[in-house]
Image (spheres, rainbow, N blue to C red):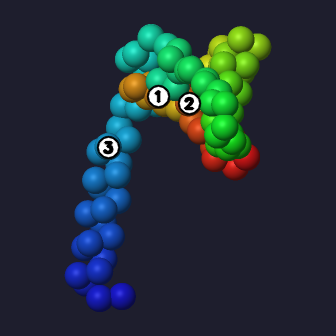
Amino acid sequence: MSRSYRKIIRNRKQRIARRLAGRGEVHRTDEGSPVMSASNIHYEMAGKAQGMSYGGIGAIHQMVRNMGLVQELDGRLGLLKLYAPYHESDHVLNITYNVT
């Protein structure tokens, strides 16, 4: 390995170490609600038009919120070290909704 590569790798490791220094404990900077919300959902039905199957994610998210799954995910999972602005439920539900 040449000397310049060693220097680049050493510098990268030092930058990562500086970024991670002091982040050993969980800091909640935003105690508000999760970013994903289902607060303004309206469904309409036309007389002649046929519906499509892509509008149900809002209803599913409302059901998830009403079941208390969002609060359980935020309370029981310890995925994030820094909560600014996303919560665990935002990340888990985002992955879940994109898979389905």
The residue lying at 64 percent from left, 40 percent from top is 49
Give yes or no for contact between labels 2 and 1 (Cβ–Cβ under 8 Å).
Answer: yes
Q: Residues within 10 Å of mark 2 (few under 14, many from 20)?
A: some
Left or right of 83 on screen, residue 89: right
Kindly identify the residue that appears in the image at 46 percent across and 28 percent down: 86
**Amino acid carrying mark 3 in the image:** Arg
Residue 5 percent location from the top left of the image = 29, 80
Which residue position is annotated with label 1? 86
Q: Type of residue at label 1? A: Tyr
Q: Which residue is mark 3?
A: 19
Q: Residues within 10 Å of mark 3 (few under 14, many from 20)?
A: few
Q: Which residue does the numbered mark 2 point to in the structure image?
A: 90
Q: Could you tell me how far apart the alpha carbons at marks 2 and 1 are, in whole angstroms?
A: 6 Å
60 sits left or right of 9 in the view: right
Q: Amino acid at mark 2?
A: Asp
Quarter where residue 8 is shown: bottom left
If you read the primary sequence from the N terminus, does the residue marked by circle 2 or circle 3 appear first?
A: 3
| Number of the front mark, 2 or 3 | 2
